[in-house]
Image (cartoon, helix red, strand yellow):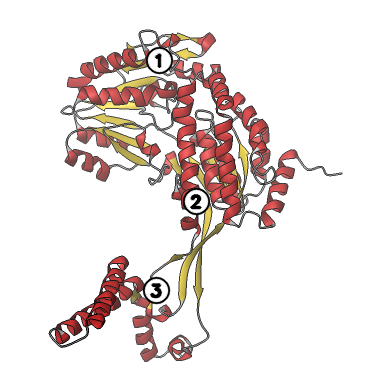
Amino acid sequence: MYRMSREQLVVQRARKSFQTGRTKPLEFRIHQLKSLLRFISERRRDIADAVKKDLGKSEHGTELFETLGLEGEIKLAVEKLAEWAAPRPVEKNLLTISDEVYVQPEPLGVVLIIGAWNYPWAVTLQPLVGAIAAGNGAIIKPSEVSSHSAKVMEELLPQYLDKDLYPVVTGGVPETQELLKQRFDHIFYTGSSTVGKLVMEAAARHLTPVTLELGGKSPCYIDKNCDIAIACRRITWGKFVNCGQTCIAPDYILCEPSIQSRVVEEINKNVKEFYTDNPKTFEDYGRIINQRHFKRVMALMEGSTIAVGGDSDESQCYIAPTVLKDVTRESRVMKEEIFGPLLPIITVSGVDEAIQFINEREKPLVVYVFSHNNKLIKRVIAETSSGALLANDCLVHFTVSALPFGGVGNSGMGCYHGRHSFDQLSHLRSCLIKQLKMEGVNSMRYPPHTAKKLGWARFFLLKQVDVCRLRRMALLTMFAGLAAFVVQVKGQNIPFQSKLGLKGFILISAMLYFRGL
């Protein structure tokens, strides 16, 4: 007798629940979002304890980098959901000018969210915010590598969210593979490019669309004429937060040989300021997730000269903030994404060589550039391609909900945050509602197709009409006519009450016009 796996049963239950239509009302979605917010608020200590066990992160660090942004995303979704879910009118052509034409966001169905271990709460639950807001069911698969966070999520999240629609499935590779055999309406994966390809391959069997939030080697170019002290301070923070295990961390520095020593000196100074002379004992400096990754990161230093740091302790999965020099294009550390506290410096002759160096490699998640020269920054924007570009700071673009967060090419596909999460996990359905009238206008599309009909069709179909602009023009015309009327009757013997009423009418018309702008 055939027996369904646990993963099959979970997906089946979520789909049956979704098909009842329970997720359609905005009130239901808002209630679930508020419950998620309550979960974060009430279980803050459980979350912090789990992250401490997984990554050695302090309670304050967990709040700053895990839950604070998550709370902001939920509050934004609750506030804006009615606006995001509303029909979106679009421009018409003359053939459809009297029709109702709009885009209607609608839920996709059941979404699979596969989280990552480096920020086990933020990168797992932020996509969930978009899934709930868009009216989907969602299977949540936290990374088994951050095992303590996964366990807390499995035990506590169902106490706050609908158990059928938003179940948490834990486990390792076999469980994930079994989940990927099921049919989903969207898969949202955060992790490495290698696994991303496997996820995409599995999704293709069911023609399931995917969002892949991957990584890559994000370059950081330092212009020799910039404020090197401030640049290095911001780079030091962006690189070594979470022990370098951040997908958007600067992966390597590109700078001219003349400033390399100064860059090393400034980073060393900032490491001591941020993490003391002994980062190993400092509570805000974390640990590598496990010994496998510890050994991988340590092996990347082979063939390079340690300029700063280099200390390690395998028993604690500790690697000190480390800067590497004498790094070449062929060095081992340049062959893969580092995802650890190593910062190699590659010397280039200037911005031309830096741009060439970046473009010879896979498109990164972020390009960082530090410069006072706005033309140089604009040139890097124009001549490179990446998921994002950030000038004169690190990581902070992740905090801007209005910016789409995602990669391009090898660093990923699709995006999220704020409304982008809602749109990414919605089907934007095209809708046109026509009345059974004005058949004479429609006759041009019916056979026989004559040259005369083609001429009219070309005019009606190719002429786009901005209805809002037409409305504003009509109001302006009315406003101008009223003004002309006032000029005409000025000085005539009109009762005071009539003048007052006329002025009020003109004022209201003017307000309507400017509101239309």
User: Quick one: label 1, few (<14), some, or many (20+) residues within 10 Å?
Assistant: few
Q: Earlier in the sequence, mark 3 or mark 2?
A: 3
Percent x, y of residue 212: 50, 42
Q: Earlier in the sequence, mark 1 or mark 2?
A: 1
**Residue in the picture at 47% in, 13% down:** 318
User: Quick one: label 3, few (<14), some, or many (20+) residues within 10 Å?
Assistant: many
Percent x, y of residue 86: 49, 61
Numbered badge on residue 302: 1
The quadrant holding residue 148 is: top right
Q: Is residue 468 found left or right of 356 in the rendered image?
A: right
Q: Is residue 285 found left or right of 392 in the rendered image?
A: right
Q: Amino acid at mark 3?
A: Lys
Q: Is residue 389 found left or right of 407 in the rendered image?
A: left
Gap between marks 3 and 2 measured at Cα: 25 Å
Q: Which residue is mark 3?
A: 92
Q: Nearer the viewer, mark 1 or mark 2?
A: 2
User: Quick one: label 2, few (<14), some, or many (20+) residues within 10 Å?
Assistant: many
**Residue in the picture at 19% in, 79% down:** 483
Q: Amino acid at mark 1?
A: Glu
Q: Is residue 435 above or below residue 152?
A: below
Report the quarter where the C terminus lies: bottom left
Percent x, y of residue 452: 36, 91
Which residue is nearer to you in this view: 504 or 111? 504
Q: Amino acid at mark 2?
A: Phe
**Residue in the picture at 51% in, 14% down:** 317
Q: Earlier in the sequence, mark 1 or mark 3?
A: 3
Q: Which residue is mark 2?
A: 422
